[in-house]
Image (cartoon, rainbow, N blue to C red):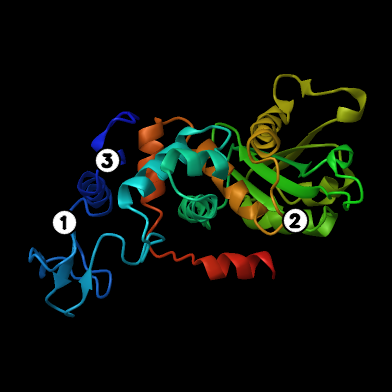
Amino acid sequence: MSFDLTNPIFTKETAARKHLESIMWPDGPYCPHCGETDNVHKLKGKSHRAGLHQCNSCRGAFTVTVGTVLERSRIPLHKWVLAFHLINASKKGISAHQMHRMLGVTYKTAWFMMHRVREAMRENSTDGLGGQNKVIEADETYVGGKAKNAKRGAPIPTKEPVVSLVERDGKVRSFHLPNVNRNNLRTVLVTQIDRKSYLMTDDAGYYKRTGKEFSGHGTVNHSIDEYVRGGFWHTNTVEGYFSILKRGITGTYQHVSQQHLKRYLGEFDFRYNYRKVTDAERTVVAFKGISGKRLTYRRINETAHA
């Protein structure tokens, strides 16, 4: 399927539901309450809401959105489908203001929808990056507002440290840290990277000791303008990822709170990790991540004030 805004899945509720069912139920509907796949039938009575199914084993009723981040949403399903496509098709992200204009919903609703989509895009892989004969580039950067842009009398915005690990020709994982030091970095490196990997960093001192725990550790000295040596020693891959991240944060979102930064990192990580597929294919993968996750407006606000 191509990304065509005239497609009925973006304008018609029935088409959107069938599209989502084809993604979530490729082998037919299954009960999210008990896992039943065979003894399930669709309720077609006039009093039943569209897309309602019943499990004859546990007697539970459900639709394709039950047990997902879309559960109990009053927003039309075709607007959810469009929101997923817009976020996954926008390399540098799309602002909540732009989303609310395109979807015809309030800004508050668009903001909440986008956090639900980011929750679906969040990947919790426990597998280590890299492996034998694999190179992992690690580096840190800082994102946030600039002091010169702060209004008179307002507190100077702080920049938040972000560490990203990029496997060459592979995936990226980014982490928001309270601060950058040897202990914090070591925790991220040894828990996320296979020890058989070759670690590539700049010459910052906090990488030196931890680098010895991997099969090899190469560095480049940025302080003397050394960025590539021998065509192999460099951190250009992770620097390239940072350029996309910063353009999105400063150019599209402009302000990202400390509390929600991890969700934005998950969004940019996801698009980068599925950069070699089409926008439509990337969106399908994102939809498959909606199951088993709930994100209420109260939970988002509790996180923001934690």
Numbered label attached to residue 9:
3
Q: Position of residue 166 (x, y in %)?
A: 63, 39
Look at label 3 and name its amino acid: Ile
Determine whether 250 is above or below 33 in the image.
Answer: above
Q: Are marks 3 and 2 in contact (CB under 8 Å)?
A: no
- Asked if residue 28 shows in the view, the reply is yes
Q: Position of residue 60 (x, y in %)?
A: 20, 77
Judged left or right of residue 181, residue 133 is left
Look at label 2 and name its amino acid: Leu
Judged left or right of residue 178, residue 57 is left
Secondary element type, mark 3 = helix
Residue drawn at point x = 48 percent, y = 64 percent:
295
- Asked if residue 131 shows in the view, the reply is no
Query: Which tag is nearer the camera, tag 3 or tag 2?
Result: 3
The residue singled out by tag 2 in the image is 177
The residue singled out by tag 1 in the image is 28
Residue drawn at point x = 54 percent, y = 36 percent:
272
Query: Which tag is nearer the camera, tag 3 or tag 1?
Result: 3
In-front residue for pair 251/223? 251
Judged left or right of residue 13, residue 233 is right
